[in-house]
Amino acid sequence: MSHINALFGMKFQKKRLFNVLGFGVVVVWLVMMGVLIKRSYFEQAPVTVLTYHDSSSPVEESETWMAIYHADDKIGFAWSRIIKESDGYVVLESAVMNLRAIGEVHRISTEIIGHLDRDASLRSFVFQLGSGMVRFEARGRVEGQYLVLNTGFGGETRESKIVLNEKPFLSIGLWPHLLKKGLVVGAQYRLSLFDPFIMAQRPVEISVIARETVVLDGTRWEAYKVKTTFAGLDVFTWIGPNGERLKEEGLMGLRLVKTTEDEARLGIRSDPEIDITEAASIPSNMVLDEPSDLVYLKIRLDGIDPEGLDLNTGRQRLAGSVLEIALESNEPRRVYKEVQLEPYLKASHFIQSDHPTIKALSGKILGRVKEDEAKAGRIFNWVYESLDKRATVSVPNALDALTTKAGDCKEHAVLVDALARAARIPAKVCVGLVYTRERFYYHAWNEVFLGDWRTADALMGQMPADVTHVKFVEGDLDRQAEMVRVIGQIKLTVLEAR
């Protein structure tokens, strides 16, 4: 092991960390992509979809209830409402769900209020996510070409601006906009969606692909099947003859079904049978007894398109569908120009490296240490020792991780990033897979620049991280959104390990 690893002076506790590996990444991606909480939970206007083409026609006030299922388990419900105003609409939606992960059930609640213009584009919003003691809030308003954001982290509010390249829509505003245009088989639309979870604007593509019959509670409905593609994730929605959303199917067997309020609230399992993290994990065809002793891993990746992913970077080399990973050397590396590293030194919504508390703690941890390798070792050692290894459902950000002193892989990663950047050490978050107990689980860790990029996992106490850490993407949550096209799709085969 490297002399940096020696700074830790502790052994990776496999059983304890297994209880949090994979949890945060999978649940955050599910929530972040809106499979459960941000896909238009309101009944549409009572109009005929085929003939509704008048862009000046209003969307009527309505309310709808949806039951949320994971496979055959009823895990929650969603409620939504649309209210007309003289200059637009107010849309409200909330959802409550129980998710099991690594044997523990987490109750997650979300709320969003959106103020929309007459064309259903975004004017302002308030978004909240709650889970146990964790609560996240974001507020935003459109001002000209900017979206002004106020986010709550660590008991404080942070304001920032995002430049809008196109007119933004909330996901809850998509259907009013499209119904005003008219749904016809073969119609295709492209809009710019602002996701309040990842604080970023992303394109969404919508296609009306077929007419199908849907049966709900013994009633047959003639519906339009609509495909919505966001960040590589396909969600299918069935729209009834009066514009109502009948059902929706998305990632990993998650689906929503229109029902009454009483039926939506009844029969929700307090102990869902399916473990979301286990369901997302990938079995290994080869048993790897001591992953930390490996220096080389060769695997084949099937079922995904590698285009746009960060598979061929750092210690990883991709040729076709075969990926090779080699453990990093600790020899000194050539230092690149500072300008190339500047993006990895800046503060962001979730990596608050410029906050006085983060800067003060970073300075305290480092003391009089001057060399970057020693600085990195101290930071990783401090995070590894100071954060309780606990599964959490939250928007991962450094201030909250520091306040709670607890979290899973994502909290460890964002805090390391913030402390390292505060010390002028370039750092980034990586997400992908890691091997444990004969399976590959979704996970998050870091890379820090010490003459070259080196992996480091503060949850597992590994620097460098072992070669079973398979990176798919790197960067903030807006970049990590690309992982939704990997979850549930990828097949992995170990070809060689030594």
Image (spheres, rainbow, N blue to C red):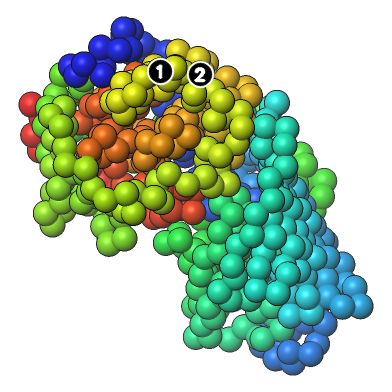
Q: Which quadrant holds residue 146?
A: bottom right
Out of 283 and 118, give the one closest to the viewer.
118
Q: How many marks?
A: 2
Coordinates of residue 269 in the picture (x, y in percent): 66, 32
* Quadrant (top left, top right, bottom left, bottom right) of the N terminus: top left
From the viewer's perspective, is residue 364 above or below residue 355? above
Coordinates of residue 343 in the picture (x, y in percent): 41, 51
SS for dot 2: helix
Crowd tier of the residue under label 2, counting other residues whose Cα lies within 10 Å: few below 14, some 14–19, many 20 or above:
few
Say which amino acid is labelled 2.
Lys
Say which amino acid is labelled 1.
Arg
Residue 444 visible: no
Which residue is located at x 43 percent, y 44 percent?
345
Q: Which quadrant holds residue 424?
A: top left
Which residue is located at x 56 percent, y 25 percent?
360
Quickly name the residue at label 1.
Answer: 368
Quickly name the residue at label 2.
Answer: 364
Coordinates of residue 318 in the picture (x, y in percent): 15, 51
From the viewer's perspective, is residue 271 above or below residue 43? above
* Quadrant (top left, top right, bottom left, bottom right) of the C terminus: top left
User: Closer to the camera: disc 1 or disc 2?
Assistant: 1
Crowd tier of the residue under label 1, counting other residues whose Cα lies within 10 Å: few below 14, some 14–19, many 20 or above:
few
In this rendering, position of residue 343 left or right of residue 39: left
- Farthest residue to the right: give it: 86
Coordinates of residue 4 in the picture (x, y in percent): 26, 19
